[in-house]
């Protein structure tokens, strides 16, 4: 029997779109957890996961490589380095909650550069200006016809989470918008 190393391939591996003032690149693989819980479970889950679950709309929280996105009054997306056992950490918590590993469902795209906001705004109805969507803000919204989660990671950088099955569409849409943003 041979020793075969299995590697996880992303749906956008090898694709990069770079223009004068914006670049669109696939982000590295990550562990992801979809978490649902009532307010009385937040403290115990935060302790187990090692990051304070945000409780305000459009907010996120990070500790080391782990980030938690607030998606609704009882819903979060937790993202960490690949291979982290997020589900196992939640399994130790004795309060009512629902945790689902969605690591293979989602993928992420980094949109960065001076025209990052303009590139996203070409297909997103949400106000992504610094004032309305500061660094750390996160929201479930649309790019074109696809549901995404946008997280502003820097003054000119956004993480776009989307389902793998829509990743080609979202990447192509953002690439065309990025090309148009420099014209």
Image (cartoon, rainbow, N blue to C red):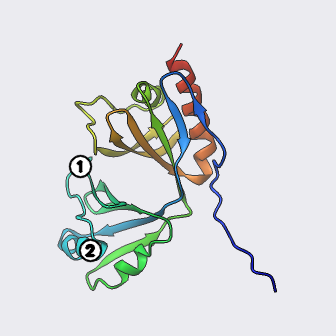
> Which residue is depicted at the point 29% across and 83% down?
93
Image quarter in which the N terminus is found: bottom right
Which is nearer the eye, 109 or 59?
A: 109
Instruction: Work out how far the residue at label 1 is from the one at label 2, CA to CA, in angstroms.
Output: 18 Å
Quadrant assignment, res 154: top left
> Which residue is depicted at the point 58% across and 39% down?
171
Classed neighbour count for the residue bearing mark 2: other residues with Cα under 10 Å, few (<14), some (14–19), many (≥20): many
Q: Is residue 35 above or below residue 171?
A: below
Residue 75, how many percent across, how many down? 32, 61
> Which residue is depicted at the point 28% across and 36% down?
133
> Which residue is depicted at the point 32% across and 61% down?
64
Residue 71, how many percent across, how many down? 32, 54
Q: Is residue 130 above or below residue 35?
A: above
Image quarter in which the C terminus is found: top right
Which is nearer the eye, 129 or 38?
A: 129
Q: Is residue 108 left or right of residue 176?
A: left
Residue 53, how many percent across, how many down? 25, 63
Q: Which mark is residue 127?
A: none
Q: Sequence order check: which comes first, mark 1 or mark 2? A: 2
Q: Which mark is residue 45?
A: 2
Of helix, strand and loop, which one carries label 1?
A: loop
């Amino acid at each position: 029997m041979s020793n075969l190393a299995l590697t996880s391939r992303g749906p956008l591996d090898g694709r990069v779109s770079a223009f004068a003032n914006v670049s669109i690149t696939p982000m590295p693989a990550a562990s992801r957890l979809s978490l649902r819980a009532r307010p009385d479970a937040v403290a115990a889950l935060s302790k187990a996961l090692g990051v304070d679950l945000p409780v305000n709309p459009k907010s996120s929280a990070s500790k080391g490589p782990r980030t938690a996105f607030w998606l609704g009054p009882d819903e979060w997306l937790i993202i960490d380095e690949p291979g982290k056992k997020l589900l196992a950490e939640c399994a130790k918590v004795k309060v009512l909650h629902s945790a689902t590993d969605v690591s293979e469902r989602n993928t992420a795209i980094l949109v960065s550069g001076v025209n990052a906001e303009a590139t996203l705004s070409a297909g997103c109805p949400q106000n992504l200006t610094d004032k309305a969507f500061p660094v750390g803000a996160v929201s479930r919204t649309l790019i074109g016809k696809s549901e995404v989660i946008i997280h502003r990671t820097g003054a000119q950088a956004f993480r776009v989470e989307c389902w793998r099955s829509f990743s080609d569409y979202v990447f192509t849409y953002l690439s065309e918008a990025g090309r148009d943003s420099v014209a």
